[in-house]
Image (cartoon, rainbow, N blue to C red):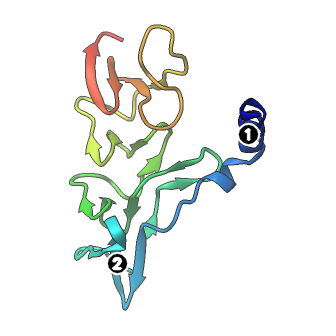
Amino acid sequence: MKKVLFLFFLVSLMSFSCKMLVNPGKPYEILNNKVYYKGARNVKIELEAADSVTFQTVSYSIESCEYRDYGKDKKNVYFKNVKIEGADPASFVMLEQGYYKDKRYLYFYGKRLKDSDSKKEIKFIKDNKDTDCIPWGDGGCVINNGHKYKDGIKYFKGA
C-alpha cells in the first residue's frame, strides 16, 4: 500500500507544471514612491537609492522555473536589498542556473564572477559525468573566458 501511495504521489507531482509548483512571490514592493525588498518573515527593507518609477524585477522566468531576488532601475542593479556595484542595469539579464550577465561580466547571487567576460562565449555544463555540477537550478557550472565556475566560484583555469 505504501508503494502504491508513493507511486501515486510521484505521478501526481510529475503531472504538474513548473508554473504550479513554483510560487515566485514578489520580492520587491513599491509603496508611496519607495522600493522595498521583502526579506525574511516579509520584513520590508527600503532600497534607499532605488528609483520607484523605473524599478523592475529581473528575477523570474516561468519558462525555466527559475526565481531569484534581482531587481533594477535606470541606474542600479540590486540583489535582494543590496546594490551590485558596477553592474549595468540597461544590459542586465537572467541566463540560467542562477547566473546573470550585463555587458561586461557574469554574476551569481549578487556577486560579480572574478575574471568573467560576458562578451566571450558562455557555456553551461549540461551533464554531470565528470563534475558535481547540477544541470538545473542553482549549483550549475559555467565556462567563460577560459575559466570554469561552480556555484559562482572560479575553481580552475584552462577549461
Q: Position of residue 113 (x, y in %)?
A: 27, 35
Residue 1 horizontal side relative to residue 64, left or right? right
Instruction: Give left or right: position of 125 versus 14.
Output: left
Res. 78 image quadrant:
bottom left
Q: In the image, which disc is placed on residue 14?
A: 1
Amino acid type, callout 1: Met
Q: Residue at x 76, y 44 (%)?
A: 12
Residue at 29% x, 52% y is: 87
- Work out whether residue 57 can be spotted: yes
Q: Which one is in front, 14 or 146?
A: 14
Label 1: which secondary element: helix
Question: Which residue occupies the foreground of this view, 58 or 130?
Answer: 130
**Kind of residue indicated by mark 2:** Val
Q: CA distance from mark 2 to mark 1?
A: 37 Å
Question: Residue 64 — which label?
Answer: none
- Give the camera-side residue of 3 and 47: 3
Whole-percent x, y for residue 19 in the image: 67, 54
Dot 2 alpha-carbon crowd within 10 angstroms: few under 14, some 14 to 19, many 20 or more: many
Please identify, in this view, whether the residue under mark 2 or under mark 1 is nearer the observer. Answer: 1
* Rendered image quadrant of residue 50: bottom left
The residue positioned 27% from the left and 13% from the top of the image is 157
- Quadrant where the N terminus sits is top right
Task: Label 2: state its secondary structure.
Answer: strand
Q: Look at mark 2 in the image and give the residue it sits on.
A: 35
Residue 45 image point, x, y percent: 27, 74
Closer to the chain start, of discs 2 and 1, is 1
Residue 51 higher or lower than 74, as above or below: below
Q: Is residue 39 among the parts visible in the rendering?
A: no
* Residue 105 percent location from the top left of the image: 32, 39
Q: CB of mark 2 within 8 Å of CB of mark 1?
A: no
Name the residue rendered at 46%, 64% in the picture. 57
